[in-house]
Image: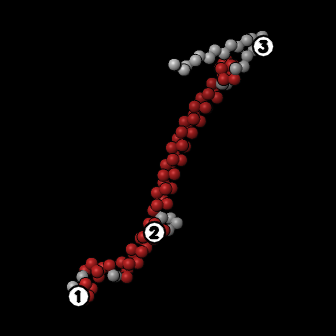
Amino acid sequence: MTFKQIKDNKIVKIISNKYFLVLVIFAVWMLFFDENSFLNHRELDKEIDKLENSNEYYQKEIEADNKIISNLKDSDSLEKFAREEYKMKKKNEEIFIIEFDTVKE
C-alpha cells in the first residue's frame, strides 16, 4: 500500500479529521482527568448511597427512641427503666444481680 492509498482510506480520513481528534481528546479529558470526571462522579454516587442508607438507619433509631421517650412519661415505666438500666433502688431496698455463665465448655 502506498501512502496515497492509506490516506484515501475512509477510516484514516475520519481519524485524521481535526474535529474528531478534538472530540476524542475532550472525551478522554472529561472521563478521566477533569475535576468532575466520570470516575469522581461514580465515587460520589457511592458515597451518597452510603449516606442515604445511614440516614434511613438513624431515622429508624430516632423513631425507636421517641417511642421509648413517650413510654418514659409514665412514672411506673420510668421507675422500671431506671431500675433495669441504671440499677437504681428505693431506700431500705437491696438489689441482687444474678449473672448466668453462658460459656459452654
Mark sitting earlier along the chain (1/2) = 1
Residue under numbered circle 2: 30
Query: 76 left or right of 8?
Result: right
Looking at the picture, which amino acid does disc 3 mark? Lys
Looking at the picture, which amino acid does disc 2 mark? Met
Q: Nearer the viewer, residue 6 or 105?
A: 105
Which-is-in-front pick, marks 1 and 3? Answer: 1
Residue under numbered circle 1: 2
Looking at the picture, which amino acid does disc 1 mark? Thr
The answer to whether the residues at label 1 and label 2 have Cβ atoms under 8 Å apart is: no
Q: Nearer the viewer, residue 19 or 73?
A: 19
Mark sitting earlier along the chain (1/3) = 1
**C-alpha span from label 1 to label 3:** 107 Å
Tell me the quarter of the picture where residue 62 sits. top right
Residue 36 lies, in percent from the top left, at: 50, 64
Q: Residue drawn 36% across and 78% down?
A: 20
Q: Is residue 44 above or below residue 23?
A: above
